Amino acid sequence: MMPIGPLMIEHRWIERVIADLQLRLGAHSPRKPIDPAYVERVVDFLRTYADRCHHGKEEDILFRDLEQKALEPGLVASMRELVSEHEWARATTRRLVSAHASSAAGNKDSMADVRRLLADLASFYPKHIEKEDKNFFRPVMACLSTDEQQAMLGEFARFDASLIHEKYRRLAQDLEAES
Ligand SMILES: [Fe+2]
Ligand SMILES: [Fe+2]
């Protein structure tokens, strides 16, 4: 398998959550608050899976290795654009978390912000994924040898294995800090 295999499987899971989010937003009256427990679950998915696990492997491993290759200028420009889109998604998710906290504290105006930010993320992810799947992943694989691709798959697996420890060690530290 090429390293883009696991990344493309992750894309399919992100698409499923985003399609479900779009359905919920479409079926939901704009005047009613969105279930706070749902917002927390979708934020956890976006932060832990879509950003830390998925964008993490793209940026910290795939893009890092591609920086060492003589990519054609169009691919270099695409890689810069993808990184800035990841930054946008991260910042938008942070804004969603703070709008959600404000809405939970009773601020009625923040409810509309939660809805708008969820809609922004729902329209962002399919376009970002399509750009990678159709125009970036396959051409960049040609820049890596079979050995480099195998090594990258191994590094992806080690990266994924470290995440559960990272997530729950942080939770443990947060719990300690709060007591
Ligand atoms: Fe990406
Ligand atoms: Fe991706």
Image (tube, rainbow, N blue to C red):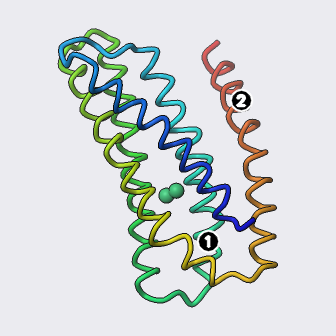
Classify mark 1: helix, strand or loop. Answer: helix
Give the percent coordinates (x, y) of residue 66: 60, 77
- Residue at 34 percent across and 49 percent down: it is 124
Number of callouts: 2
Q: For disc 2, does the CB lie below 8 Å from ligand 2?
A: no
State how far apart marks 2 and 1 are (Cα): 26 Å
- Residue at 24 percent across and 28 percent down: it is 113
| Mark 2 Cα-neighbour bin, 10 Å: few <14, some 14–19, many ≥20 | few
Q: Are marks 2 and 1 in contact (CB under 8 Å)?
A: no
Give the percent coordinates (x, y) of residue 68: 62, 83
Residue 142 location, quadrant:
bottom right
Classify mark 2: helix, strand or loop. Answer: helix
- Residue at 47 percent across and 30 percent down: it is 43
Position above or below: 8 against 46: below
Q: Horizontal placement of 176 versus 117: left or right?
A: right
Decide which of 130, 77 is in the foreground and name it. Answer: 130
Position above or below: 61 against 121: below
Give the percent coordinates (x, y) of residue 27: 28, 20
Q: Amino acid at mark 2?
A: Tyr
Q: Amino acid at mark 1?
A: Arg
Q: Quadrant of the C terminus?
A: top right
Residue 165 location, quadrant:
top right
Which residue lies under the disc numbered 1?
Answer: 64
Q: Horizontal placement of 115 versus 133: left or right?
A: left
Which residue lies under the disc numbered 2?
Answer: 168
Q: Tell me the tag on residue 111.
A: none
- Residue at 57 percent across and 62 percent down: it is 59
Residue 130 location, quadrant:
bottom left
